[in-house]
Image: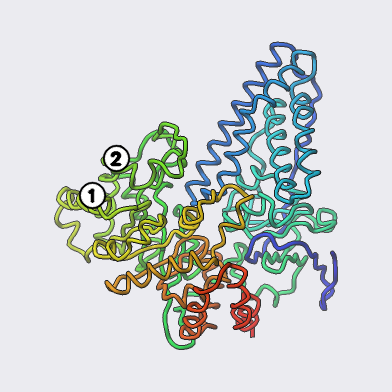
Amino acid sequence: MTSANSSGRTQLKGIAAAPGQAFAPAWRWKETPLESTMPGPTGEAGADELERAVEHVKARLAVTTARLHGVGASAEAGILEAQALMLEDPALLEGARELVIQGTAADVAVAETMAPFAAMLRASPDPVFQARAADVDDVVGQVRRALLGLSDAPAMPSQPSIVVARDLAPSQTAGLDRALVVGFATEQGTATAHTAILARALGLPAVVGIPGLVDAVADGQALLLDGDEGTLLVDPPADAVRDLAGPATLAVDAEPALTRDGRRVEVGSNAANLEDAQRAAAAGADGIGLLRSEFLFLGSDQLPTEDEQVAMLEAVTAAMGTRPVILRTLDVGADKPLPALPQPSEANPALGVRGLRLQLLRRPDLLADQLRAALRVAAKHPLRLMFPMVSTVDEVRQAKAILAEAVKDVNAAAVNGPRLQVGIMIEVPAAAIGADVLAREVDFFSLGTNDLTQYLFAADRTNPELGPLADSLHPALLRMIDQVVRAARQHRRWVGVCGEMASDLWAVPLLVGLGVNELSVHPPMVARIKATIRQLSAADCAKVAVAALKLEGGEAVRQLLAQHHLEPSSLRTRTDR
């Protein structure tokens, strides 16, 4: 839908797909036609070429998947992992191979073999299956590009821009350079499609389903993208962007987040690399609530040395100045592979040797290296430690024993600073239930609500059909959070939330009401979450949270929040006054 606002400027209306605002020049996506002027080989030679192309695409998907795991988008990485599984489907490989041997060009054979499957998905009345058709098309496109010798890496703008396209495939979205793409708008797509899911995971504001978009916007034209309202304003007036912080459009709020009745809630940021830390600092985050150390290990087939880890950690902590940084030790396993740390396959990797389990059972040397590096950096900067995937108190004690040895190994002068705070992730139900015992061993808890929700409901978070089960507002999850907070309070420990729930504007009043001390969110959400907290009364939120614990389902909780005017639209209206 297109309309003109009071200033005469064009406003395009679409579907709000990923939250946040962005102001930047338009960059029209250059889609390479999948056409060849020379037909490829057929017969056995063509079949061999098809096999090489498939292996090439699988390898590239593995690299992109590892990058998503590295930025904490493990659930979303499952989208591309599912694409890789398509490339192992005998129906695809054998069907396309047979056509090639019979004389069909390999790129055409791939398209013809997969077309019926995509058509069947599009014809389904279920929107989940309809969305999967885009994944089939994406896989076909990747294999055809490999066969035609077209570049895997799409061209990127030369300056921070808003991408404008007819559509973006999931693999294309996952490959966007966040330093140069600050948001995107497309003519096609839905809020539940995998492209939108990946945009939310990457912190990219997005509006999809805008009719006539590509013809309405020229390269370089100034755009104001609003991923909350689902609008795109072309050539916006100066007053419409006065609250935005330049081309990257990162809103800034360095002031404390105090509720109306004076309770402070720390609003930190999740980070997966130095760039994220710089964005968090620029946004006014109170600290880094989750620094994913996987970034130290990505992009190389060699494990980093202790000195290399120190250098990168010093860069991140320096970017944050005096604000604390919580380093999560290596959180990988069979479900999150690293090139330099191959692991045997597991039948159920989400429940396998991952996180702290991997470090304790197989590679305590890696944990020791990380801890020594952290101790060296903590002597000069406010660095804290956090262990992932904890299930039992014995695991914590084993990790602390390795930490004690690391303290002995590090020069005494390097550990004379403030005592290093040590915490754990609460993402396994056993840890939540045993929080009263675990609180005696650590200084803080951080709720990893993505995995905690998955394990609590026994619902694979990479399976879109189970999405309704993984409801972060379900009273069962709220009761578990309440139990953790109460256990921590009993032992004078603090509790943070670093999962997606911390950025959910529906959940913020409940988390405040339950007594959570810190929320760690994506950098673009820092200012929004702080503004929301300032509209709340902690006492009123506590009353609503108590009532929510007694309800039966997430929808009932949302109705309760709306009755008390604590739903996102109401809070935003108050904030904008």
User: Which image quadrant for residue 88?
Assistant: top right
Q: Is residue 303 above or below residue 131?
A: above
Q: Nearer the viewer, residue 146 or 90?
A: 90
> Which residue occupies 19% across, 51% down?
401
Work out whether residue 15 can be spotted.
yes
* Image point (54%, 63%), residue name: 472
Spot occupied by residue 293 in the image (x, y as percentages of width and height): 39, 50
Which residue was labeled with disc 2? 361
On-image quarter of the N terminus: bottom right
Quick check: 294 above or below 518?
above
How far is mark 2 from mark 1, CA to CA? 10 Å
Along the horizontal axis of the image, is 231 left or right of 394? Answer: right
Quadrant of the frame with the C terminus: bottom right
Crowdedness near tag 1: few (<14), some (14–19) or many (≥20) residues, C-alpha within 10 Å: few
**For the residue marked with disc 2, what is the amino acid?**
Leu
Q: Secondary structure at mark 2?
A: helix
Q: Is residue 243 left or right of residue 111?
A: left
> Would you say residue 376 is visible in this rendering?
no
In the rendered image, the residue lying farthest to the top is: 44
Taking the spot 40% from the left edge, 64% from the top edge, the residue there is 320
The tally of labels here is 2
Callout 2 crowding tier (Cα within 10 Å): few <14, some 14–19, many ≥20: few
Residue 532 is situated, as x and y percent measured from the top left of the image, at 55, 77
What secondary structure is found at the residue carrying circle 1? helix
Residue 418, image x, y percentages: 22, 66
User: Which circle's residue, 2 or 1, is located before the other in the chain?
Assistant: 2
Amino acid residing under circle 1: Gln
Residue at the spot of label 1: 398
Residue 19's disc number: none
